[in-house]
Amino acid sequence: MDGLRHALIRDDRGTVTAEFAVVLPTVMVVALLLLSSARAVMVSMNCQEAARVAAREMVIASDGDANPSDVVARIAGPRATVRITEQRDQITVITRCPVGPGPLGVLPVAVEGEAVGLRYG
């Protein structure tokens, strides 16, 4: 009887496998969220940069030859959209860039960048 109790208490084979099976999905979800967050930050930075460059180009090409859609597509990707508002000497460029669906719906589907340019003259 004493040997059976000792065998039951000391037999811990398989516990590492069980612990690993419990922890692995959590580690995978955290890793996926970190990678998706990094992607959202990168897309947001590109979207803001595209808005800034498009606003700058609109200010420099005051004769109307600027095509901000080409600039935004080159920097933020072909699926990015551009909205331009002009008021007297102020140009506002708003870009919207898709991020894609994140895991568990936590991350935004799209991000926006906005830049304002002033024309002097």
Image: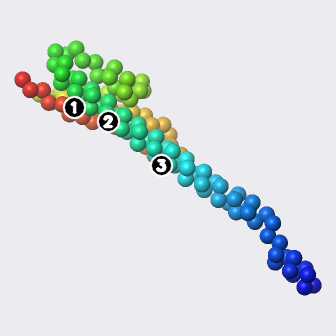
For the residue pair 80 and 35, the one nearer the viewer reads as: 35
**Amino acid carrying mark 1 in the image:** Thr
Residue at image point 37% right, 34% down:
46
In the image as oriented, which residue stretches furthest toward the bottom? 2
Q: Is residue 64 above or below residue 43?
A: above
Residue on which the image places disc 1: 92
Q: Is residue 8 visible from the viewing direction of this image?
A: yes
Q: Is residue 15 above or below residue 80?
A: below
In the image as oriented, which residue stretches furthest toward the right? 1
Asked if labels 1 and 3 touch by Cβ distance under 8 angstroms, the answer is: no
Q: Quadrant of residue 53?
A: top left
In the image as oriented, which residue stretches furthest toward the left? 121
Image quarter in which the N terminus is found: bottom right
Number of marks drawn: 3
Residue on which the image places disc 2: 48
Q: Is residue 118 above or below residue 44?
A: above
Residue at image point 55% right, 50% down:
31
Dot 1 crowding, Cα within 10 Å, few <14, some 14–19, many 20+:
many
Q: Position of residue 4 (x, y in %)?
A: 90, 80
Residue on which the image places disc 3: 106
Gap in angstroms between the C-alphas marked 3 and 1: 29 Å
**Amino acid carrying mark 3 in the image:** Val
Dot 3 falls on a residue whose secondary structure is loop
Gap in angstroms between the C-alphas marked 1 and 2: 12 Å
Dot 2 crowding, Cα within 10 Å, few <14, some 14–19, many 20+:
many
Pick whichever of labels 1 and 2 is earlier in the sequence: 2
